[in-house]
Image (tube, rainbow, N blue to C red):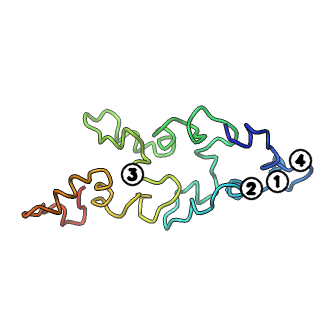
Amino acid sequence: MHPPVKQGKCTGCHDPHQSPNKFQLRATGADLCFLCHKRSIVGGKFVHGPAAAGSCSTCHAVHQSDFPKLLLAKGNQVCFDCHSDKAEEFKGKKYTHAPVQEGCVSCHNPHSANYQYLFAAEGSQELCFNCHSDKQKETDEATVKLKGLETKKKCL
């Protein structure tokens, strides 16, 4: 449950007397959310479409939800509701990388990032080494360098 709702602080979002906005909201779109939440969440160079449009409610419920962070669906399903092409791509694969199963947010920031595709780090190598630090050490110390890491695609 959204904390202001749980605490009965409806007037944090709704003006009980008058408002130019539907439902007597104090602001519209993300501006309403940013009355409490930090605007810097969408301050990256690349901003997720719904966040850029100020449509937080595309992914989040405003009052309550059955899922953490007031999400409208569980885990990856909230992403797959729009990114159905990715859901199809992963469906039925014999081997799936653990972060894909754990959650899209393992590699992607759901609001904004400074890297293309909302990646949490620059380039596949840096992103992969966030989890595979043992491989980074191994790669750095190798006397014979892995040629794939010298290509544009790096780990991919």
| Tag 2 residue | 28
Gap in angstroms between the C-alphas marked 3 and 1: 37 Å
| Tag 4 residue | 16
Gap in angstroms between the C-alphas marked 4 and 1: 12 Å
Taking depth in this image into account, of 51 and 144 the one nearest to the observer is: 144
Mark toward the start of the polypeptide (2 vs 4): 4
Say which residue appears at 61% left-offset and 40% top-offset.
Answer: 70
Mark toward the start of the polypeptide (4 vs 1): 4
Using residue 47 as the reference point, say whether residue 141 is left or right of it: left
| Tag 3 residue | 107
Instruction: Give the amino acid type for the residue marked by disc 3 in the picture.
Output: Cys
* Dot 3: element: loop
Above or below, comparing residue 43 to residue 129 in the picture: below
Above or below, comparing residue 131 to residue 98 in the picture: below
Gap in angstroms between the C-alphas marked 2 and 1: 7 Å
Quadrant of image for the C terminus: bottom left
Say which residue appears at 57% left-offset and 61% top-offset.
Answer: 42
Taking depth in this image into account, of 70 and 133 the one nearest to the observer is: 133
* Dot 4: element: loop
| Tag 1 residue | 21
Say which residue appears at 72% left-offset and 55% top-offset.
Answer: 32
Determine crowd level at label 4: few under 14, some 14-19, many 20+ residues with C-alpha closer than 10 A: few
Instruction: Give the amino acid type for the residue marked by disc 4 in the picture.
Output: Pro
Residues tagged 2 and 1 counted as in contact (Cβ below 8 A): yes
Determine crowd level at label 1: few under 14, some 14-19, many 20+ residues with C-alpha closer than 10 A: few
Mark toward the start of the polypeptide (3 vs 1): 1
Above or below, comparing residue 74 to residue 105 in the picture: above
Instruction: Give the amino acid type for the residue marked by disc 2 in the picture.
Output: Thr
Mark toward the start of the polypeptide (2 vs 1): 1
